[in-house]
Amino acid sequence: MDSPLPFLVAMSSLLLILAGLYMTRLGLLGKRRRSYPPVAGTMLHQLLNWGRLPEYMTELSRRYRQNVGGLQEFTACLTEDAISSMHYLHATLTETLRLYPAVPTDVKCCFSDDTLPDGHTVRRGDMVNYLPYAMGRMKFLWGDDAEEFRPERWLDDEGVFVPKSPYKFTAFQAGPRICLGKEFAYRQMKIFAATLLYLFRFEMWERDSTVGYRPMLTLKMDGPLCVRASPRRSTGN
Ligand code: HEM
């Protein structure tokens, strides 16, 4: 019998992220000041992007749903190698994090007087912020299409994901204190996204609806995300 491990890993990832989304939902309905867990928040913004730009969802499901039977068979295909070779999905999630970084602003406190690489001086005790949300939208970093959702910008001519400097793509911070869970987070998000796309098709409840944000520790939508999920009945659709 095939190893049940990929199935169990996929199901536990689904449960973990669904729990995060559920907490998120409670946050929206109840204590409105609660932050999103970063993986759940990123998946929420992924749904927003798929709802707004269904062609990217169609492309992903075309790539990953072909020639697969039931859910168990599909999740059994989500091996370490298969997940690593999902370059287009990796690019899609990274593009979502570029535009909607789970940690939109991050603050540092200076331990000593120093001069930053651009010549700015800082004093001991000064607070310095960097803003992944603003940096992800800067034209001089990303080009004229900086505000567009375009996963292709992360792929080379062979469709292989090409990482950019963490000092440019700062969603996970950079340097010695870079997010320790980055690779784990990508694994979780890829399993979750692939399984979601296997099961559902998403569309915005109202195609042109806008989504506002609340300034918090993690990027929080101001109000609910109204996305319709339609079950896919057979493979390939
Ligand atoms: C999309 C998902 C995630 C994003 C965008 C993200 C982002 C970040 C950022 C920006 C920091 C730096 C915070 C700071 O020092 O000011 C950080 C730190 C950290 N993250 Fe994540 N994170 C994610 C998921 C995860 C997951 C799933 C784990 C654990 C499994 C994790 C573990 C950590 C740890 C341990 C640190 C502290 C590293 C250190 O200070 O040396 N992260 N993350």
Image: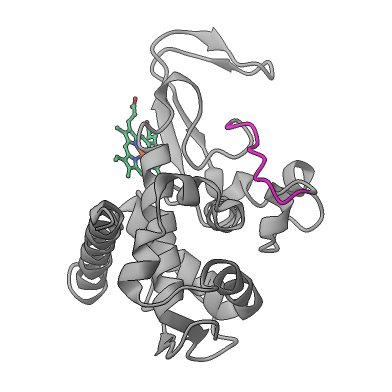
Q: Where 141 falls versus 70 (above or below)?
A: above
**Residue 221 coordinates in the image, percent (x, y):** 41, 68
Answer with the quadrant where ligand 1 appears in the image. top left
At 62% from the left and 44% from the top, the residue drawn is: 135
> Observer-nearest residue: 173 or 16?
16
**Residue 8 coordinates in the image, percent (x, y):** 22, 57
Q: Where 128 falls versus 86 (above or below)?
A: above
**Residue 142 coordinates in the image, percent (x, y):** 74, 47
Quarter holding the N terminus is bottom left
**Residue 72 coordinates in the image, percent (x, y):** 30, 70
Q: Is residue 211 rendered to the left or right of residue 1?
A: right
Query: Is 165 part of what is drawn in magenta?
Result: yes
Residue at the top extreme of this rendering: 113
Query: Is 153 part of what is drawn in magenta?
Result: no
Structure colour scheme: one colour
Please tell me how many numbered marks the rendered image carries: 0
Q: Where 26 falls versus 131 (above or below)?
A: below
At 41% from the left and 39% from the top, the residue drawn is: 182
Main secondary structure type of the part rendered in magenta: loop
- Whether residue 216 is visible: no
At 57% from the left and 32% from the top, the residue drawn is: 166
At 17% from the left and 73% from the top, the residue drawn is: 30
Highlighted magenta segment, given as a residue range: 158-166
> Observer-nearest residue: 65 or 202?
65
